[in-house]
Amino acid sequence: MRRSKTYSLFAILLLFSVLTSCSTYISTPTPTQTNLPPTETPAATFTPEPTATATLPPAPPRAQYTMNVVLDYNAKSVSVDETVVYPNHTGQPLNDLVLAVEPNFWPNCFTLNALSLNGSAVANYSLDGQKLSFALPAVLQPEATVTLQIRYTLNLPLIEPTNPNLSRPRIFGYSLKQVNLTNWYPFIVPNVAGEWVLHNPWYYGEHLVYDAADYVVNVKSADPAVTPVIASSGAPAQNGEWTTYTLTAGRAFALSASTEFLTSSAQVGNVAVTSYYFQFFEGGGKAAMNAAAQALQIFNQKYGPYPHQTLAVVMGDFNDGMEFSGFFYLSKDFYNLYDGTPKNYLIFVAAHETAHQWWFEQVANDQAAQPWLDEALATYSEHVFYEGTDPSLVSWWWAYRIDYYRPQGWVDIAVYDGGGFRPYTNAVYFRGAHFLDDLRARIGDEAFFAFLKDYLAQENGKIATSADFFRILRAHTQTDFSDLVREYFQNAY
Ligand SMILES: [Zn+2]
């Protein structure tokens, strides 16, 4: 019942994307040497050996994505040469591959120029909306590896305003002063128990699920005279005319470019926190950086270490916050409303998005089916942030951030069952925060934070489920909390 409603609501969007899919044909691959960055690859990169050798190299621990990206900032287009070394760690033989291609939701955006597997062109593939799939010529056995090459161009869409009551703002594309590459490259979706996990999008919330992967992203400007400042998920290194960004064990590599970005940086241990903002927003830009740096220190202590070398805090030229690997956006509205105090959205959403670097980035979850796993923890982490910076603001935070909305609903709903943006966030984020606070009061601080550390340690690099959460939690307490589960959750755990 519920699902058929879901699908009917989606019919127009899906039909639209099928009809406007612009990339059914591939052209003959023609390597363009001038487009390639210097061939020396960072030492950490897995380099596949020719398959003729008798002893195959061991499969890398994660998929390895190498992207050579030529950004034409003025034309709002990018051309990408992407190589994916994919190890089959699913434990099952695979007969096909499924990739998510989110840019294909936009008309005339994604053009596939070449697709090859282990050096041979893939003739029969299907590109339907966000799903690119094809049969493998031979079964991919567990722990065996294939190499995929994809060459494509993106003609970026204009980021158009959306009705905030109906759907989240769009991020991918360009505005007058920003180019945002988010969910912009084809990636192999997780395979869980023999099933490829690629959910339909929804008006709010996220629908993608990510395996952890390693990234080397080489970027250069199509016009050397146009050199935007680039915020990205990876640590940058200059490599001739290219800049190479590397990210290890990341979920989603994002880039934001602007010729108008101003930056401020702070160092937290080995981590460089850089804030990217537009002119006239220096106060908010620095405050967001400081809040992220403070949050990083607090969560390092409470949960476990931040895994990357950099964290980019990026002012979005749209009205939303959103997390990616080592990178998050904050809504321009938050900067507009920033009043110089810690009592506002800019500060607690900066803490929230920083917390996603633990709950989303290190411990991932199915964002469509079980969004509470990252969102409730990220929201409650705002509470943990104020406890660590100014405990007198915790009661203000409850009143202003959470209880003003009189939250109701089951914490463990799927994104499709939210019934609107506000009821959805009320249930998943806000009731989720109340559940975690009640749980903490019940089992005590020591058990609560020992559990979170253990949950991070055990599920790091994996896609955790609600069952994993409660299994690990129960190992840390003898106290009965079954009434809290009944009060907040529609399912039994
Ligand atoms: Zn969130």
Image (cartoon, rainbow, N blue to C red):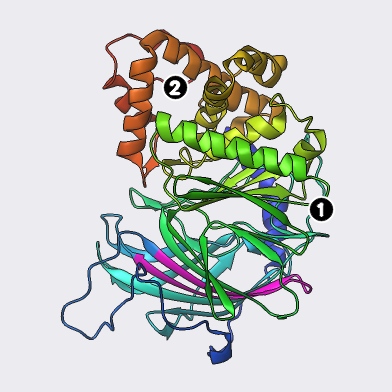
Q: Residue at x 51, y 59 (%)?
A: 234
**Quadrant showing the C terminus:** top left
Within the magenta stretch, is there residue 100?
no
Crowdedness of circle 2 by 10 Å Cα count: few (<14), some, many (20+)?
few
Stretch in magenta: 64-86
Coordinates of residue 63 in the picture (x, y in percent)? 38, 63
Residue 49's image quarter? Answer: bottom left
Q: Foreground residue, 267 or 47?
A: 267
What amino acid type should be assigned to the residue bearing mark 2? Asn
Counting residues from the start of the chain, the first of labels 2 and 1 encountered is 1
In the picture, measured across the screen, residue 467 lies left or right of residue 287, that is left
**Quadrant showing the N terminus:** top right
Kindly identify which residue carries mark 2: 491
Q: Is residue 455 above or below residue 119?
A: above
Q: Residue at x 36, y 11 (%)?
A: 443
Kindly identify which residue carries mark 1: 160
